[in-house]
Amino acid sequence: MCFGLAFMLAVVILGGAYLYKYFQFQENVYFCGIKYIEDGLTLTEPDAIASAPQYQIIEESIQILQEEGVEFISVPVPEFADSAPADIVHDFQRKLTAYLDLSLNKCYVIPLNTSVVMPPKNFLELLINIKAGTYLPQSYLVHEQMVVTDRIENVDQLGFFIYRLCRDKETYKLQRKEALKGIQKRETGNCRIIRHFENRFAMETLICEE
């Protein structure tokens, strides 16, 4: 009987912790966007000023859980056809980033790039500061390229939030192209583009199959 009571108590505690994380995950969602200028064009150039450059726009839903050290980003189907809709998790405790390509229903995991991804506290402050307006003004686009490597079989080892994103989906490791040797430039037909932001600038993440 004691064993049964202990088991039931453990189930209640674990279930309560899961429900707390679940309902916490549903709160405090921001929807905002960023405007950026295409490559090779800046507002300081006379020709750019004279021609009134057109901005591209990225819109996304953002949720930040400071206590958990997690940022969750959802990028809907964009107006431009060359970018894929995606859900993204930046887990600062696990030091991992996961991308879920919603068109392919595949997950990709890579070590968190803290030089690009703004920490949760700072990112939240940025979102609060721009809450009065919808878009960040006069931003720019940064490119990064990833290469798909090994398949991950046990996503439950990647933490609660990445597990929640990637469970029951094909999940693969990514490696930044500049960190690989002997990799040739791939055609864009073998790559997927995800445009998003988690800083003051827009990111174009190119995920390429080997």
Image: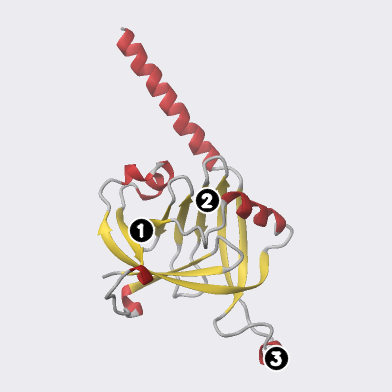
Q: What residue does disc 1 label?
A: 108
How far, Cα to Cα, is label 3 from label 1? Answer: 42 Å
Decide if residue 26 is on the left or right side of residue 179. Answer: right
Task: Give the image location of residue 20, x and y in percent.
Answer: 51, 33
Q: Are marks 3 and 2 in contact (CB under 8 Å)?
A: no
Q: Which amino acid does label 3 sit on?
A: Pro
Residue sitting at x 30%, y 48%: 168
Decide if residue 183 is on the left or right side of residue 194. Answer: left
Q: Which of marks 3 and 1 is in front?
A: 3
Q: Is residue 193 above or below residue 71?
A: below
Residue 71 is labelled as: 2
* Residue sitting farthest toward the right: 132
Residue sitting at x 61%, y 49%: 121
Q: What element carries label 3?
A: helix
How far, Cα to Cα, is label 1 from label 2? Answer: 16 Å
Colouring of the image: secondary structure
Q: Is residue 10 above or below residue 175?
A: above
Q: What residue does disc 3 label?
A: 46
Q: How crowded is mark 3: few (under 14 residues within 10 Å), some or many (20 or more)?
A: few
Task: Give the image location of residue 97, x and y in percent.
Answer: 43, 55
How far, Cα to Cα, is label 3 from label 2? Answer: 38 Å
Q: Residues within 10 Å of mark 2 (few under 14, many from 20)?
A: many
Using the image as rendered, state which of residue 207 and residue 113 is in the foreground.
Answer: 113
Q: Are marks 1 and 2 in contact (CB under 8 Å)?
A: no
Task: Give the image location of residue 106, x and y in percent.
Answer: 33, 58
